[in-house]
Image: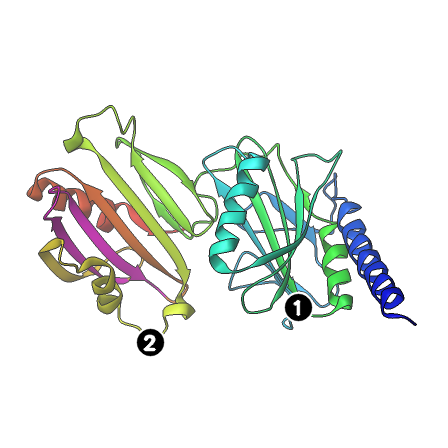
Amino acid sequence: MSYLKQLIFSLLITFACYAQAKAQLSTLKFADKLTKRHTKITGTRASIVLPSGFKKSREFAGITNKKSIQMIFIEITGQPYNRAQALENLRKEYKKQRSKIKKLVKLKNASYAPVVMQMKNSNGVKLIQVIMGDKQSMLSVTASYDSKKEKQQVLQCLRSLYFDGKAVASKDMGAKFKLDISNTQLKAMGSTGYTFYYQTKKFNKVDKAQRTQIIITQALASIYKGQSFQKLCEERAISKKQKIISRKAVQTKIGKGYWIVTKSKIDGGIICHLTTGNARFVLIIKVGTFKPEKQAIAHFEDLLLKRLSSR
């Protein structure tokens, strides 16, 4: 066979494989009804039928077969889903992470404007990701696989995916903690599934001294096993731009903890860094305010020592 014929043959095979792979993605359809076989994924409005050999993960919101397939669900609340904007943000993020999108299909005639992507991350792990959403949130489902057989398992499993757009997506959905913001001027802003945001109502309109912002990052206790809360807190709180006001071990309704209160040398803002947790999870918290120092500390104590608890 001549070189030209070999090249043409190779290109035809490559194109055929690409077309076949894209066809697999473009023909993907999701469940439009909830059945008794469906399993609800904690912290999301999604449900899925568990394939044989799979079970819900204790370590993340999703399912696993304890081998190479893990299917992780994240529902980002607090803002409406816009497919074009979501894709632009994902492309930028994947470029930073050196992940490559091999194939991308915008599914037609489907509810919630879904997109299916076949990818490979910087470690060479093969992934299939689905994104979709509505006015309340964006759902992301990412599955890893090794072989063609596992890829087919993933696609077959995704066909059972049911997204309940009629349900209400609470802005602290998936939180293992509860922050009681009743009778306060705070409101929940949304979450990424593991980071939760709160701030003062009408934030930009109220007096600067009345503004408060809270960021709570939730992680499995196993991730920080053996690490001291004090060290975790110091890594985030101590810098040349911050003056330490107080630091101490504390007991929250979650468990043991450590906090450091600092004052910015630039704008005078006061920040409380708290790391607390128990056998199930760890919370890494940052609360910022422009209240006077004594009021700020009393504010932190009320929020973090009295109003914060486990679900």
Whether the residues at callouts 1 and 2 have beta carbons within 8 Å, the answer is no
The answer to which of marks 1 and 2 sits earlier in the sequence is: 1
Dot 1 corresponds to which residue? Answer: 65
Q: Nearer the viewer, residue 259 or 288?
A: 288
User: How far across and down, in percent of the image, does residue 295 sit?
Assistant: 10, 40
Q: Residue at x 51, y 54 (%)?
A: 95
Report the predominant secondary structure element of the magenta stretch.
strand
* Residue 55 placement: quadrant: bottom right
Is 274 contained in the magenta span? yes
* Vertical relation: 226 (above or below) 307: below
Disc 1 element: loop
Give left or right: position of 237 versus 255.
left
Q: Amino acid at mark 1?
A: Asn
Give left or right: position of 169 versus 300.
right
* Vertical relation: 219 (above or below) 76: below
For the image, the number of numbered tags is 2
Residue 51 visible somewhere in the drawing: no
Q: Amino acid at mark 2?
A: Gly
User: How far across and down, in percent of the image, does residue 68 sit?
Assistant: 64, 71
**Magenta span of residues:** 256-278
Give left or right: position of 170 versus 206.
right
The furthest residue to the top: 205
**Label 1: few (<14), some (14–19) or many (≥20) C-alpha neighbours in 10 Å:** some
Disc 2 element: loop
* Residue 248 placement: quadrant: bottom left
Disc 1 to disc 2, how far (Cα)?
A: 27 Å
Q: Nearer the viewer, residue 246 or 82?
A: 82
Residue 247 visible somewhere in the drawing: yes
Dot 2 corresponds to which residue? Answer: 226
